[in-house]
């Protein structure tokens, strides 16, 4: 599949709450944290909360998602690149910066309170 880079959107399995099944969904690569692990941000087709950042077709340098989607800046986790089943595309530097700033704002206490 090749090398991964920040601002790419990859496809990986998200487990259901029973941990017995999963569904493949997109996630944004935020940072390579070493040994094949990446800090990623969940992407969904519903905003769910006011901190979600919209991602649409014009936000891509290459590739796309099937519909307008949302980066859920409060849903961060690490995942090993062996879980990535594909690359959906790469977002623009402007959109990537907007998402990073929203994460920083959330960490600085401008969150869900």
Image: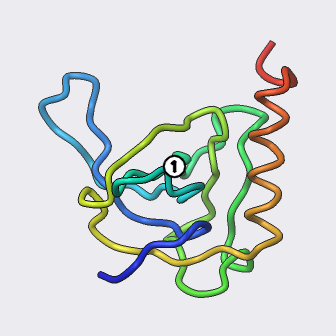
Quadrant of image for the N terminus: bottom left
Q: Furthest-front residue in view?
A: 35
Q: Residue shown at 64%/52% (left/top)?
A: 70
As rendered, which of 40 and 13 lies closer to the eye?
A: 40
Question: What number of labels is visible?
Answer: 1
Residue 48 x %, y %: 63, 34
Q: Nearer the viewer, residue 2 or 71?
A: 2
Seen at 75% across and 53% down, the residue is: 99
Q: Residue at x 35, y 54 (%)?
A: 35
Image: 1 above or below 70: below
Q: Position of residue 113 (x, y in %)?
A: 81, 12
Location of residue 9 in the rendering, given as x and y in whole percent from the top left corner: 51, 66
Looking at the rendered structure, the secondary structure element under dot 1 is strand
Q: Would you identify the image quadrant in which residue 81 lies?
A: bottom left
| Residue 92 lies in quadrant | bottom right
56 vs 15, left or right, is: right
Q: Nearer the viewer, residue 87 or 36?
A: 36
Expressed as whole percent of the image width and height from the top left, the position of residue 17 reads 28, 24
Q: Residues within 10 Å of mark 1 (few under 14, many from 20)?
A: many
Q: Left or right: 12 with respect to 57?
A: left
Front-most of 88 and 69? 88
Left or right of residue 3, residue 44 in this image: right
Can you identify the residue that label 1 sits on? 40
User: Relative to residue 21, is residue 78 drawn left or right?
Assistant: right
Compared to 3, does 69 lie above or below?
A: above
């Amino acid at each position: 599949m090749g090398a991964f880079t920040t601002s790419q959107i990859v496809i990986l399995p998200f487990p259901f709450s029973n941990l017995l099944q999963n569904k493949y969904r997109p996630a944004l690569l935020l940072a390579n944290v070493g040994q094949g692990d990446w800090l990623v941000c969940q992407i969904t087709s519903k905003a769910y909360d006011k901190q979600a950042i919209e991602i649409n077709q014009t936000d891509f340098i290459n590739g796309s998602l099937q519909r307008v989607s949302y980066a859920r800046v409060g849903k961060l986790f690490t995942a090993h690149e062996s879980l990535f089943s594909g690359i959906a595309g790469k977002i623009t530097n402007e959109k990537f910066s907007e998402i990073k700033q929203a994460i920083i704002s959330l960490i600085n206490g401008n969150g869900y309170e």
